[in-house]
Amino acid sequence: MPYVNIKITNEQVTPEKKEQLIQGVTQLLVDVLNKNPETTVVVIDEVDTDNWGIGGKSVTNRRKEEK
């Protein structure tokens, strides 16, 4: 039973886009590893940009600096 955990920044990703991610990842596991889609688990965690750091800075601050 495959378990896939997708972590994305919390930036109003629509339920439709999340559904596309779940379907796409499930299909990828079917195509590449011949896994059963009925037992494939996909979890999406949304992380606030204040809690996601890259290069020693939060995504929130990096984006402020880019503007």
Image (cartoon, helix red, strand yellow):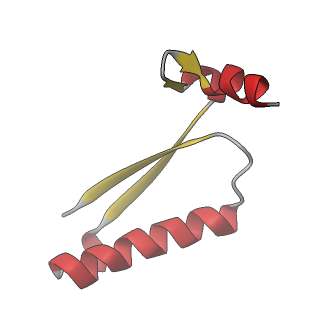
Q: Quadrant of residue 31?
A: bottom left
Describe residue 65's horizontal placement relative to residue 46 as left or right. Answer: right
Q: Taking 3 as reference, is 49 above or below it? A: above
Q: Quadrant of residue 13?
A: bottom right
Q: Position of residue 28 (x, y in %)?
A: 32, 76
Q: Position of residue 7 (x, y in %)?
A: 47, 43
Q: Quadrant of residue 65?
A: top right
Q: Taking 18 as reference, is 32 above or below it? A: below
Residue at coordinates 54% horizontally, 26% vertically from top-left?
A: 52
Q: Position of residue 59 (x, y in %)?
A: 62, 27
**Residue 43, visible in the rendered structure:** yes
Residue at coordinates 18% horizontally, 64% vertically from top-left?
A: 1
Residue at coordinates 57% horizontally, 17% vertically from top-left?
A: 57
Describe residue 53's horizontal placement relative to residue 15 as left or right. Answer: left
Which is nearer the eye, 8 or 55? 55
Q: Position of residue 56 (x, y in %)?
A: 49, 15
Describe residue 49's horizontal placement relative to residue 20 as left or right. Answer: right
Q: Taking 46 as reference, is 15 above or below it? A: below
Residue at coordinates 48% horizontally, 22% vertically from top-left?
A: 55
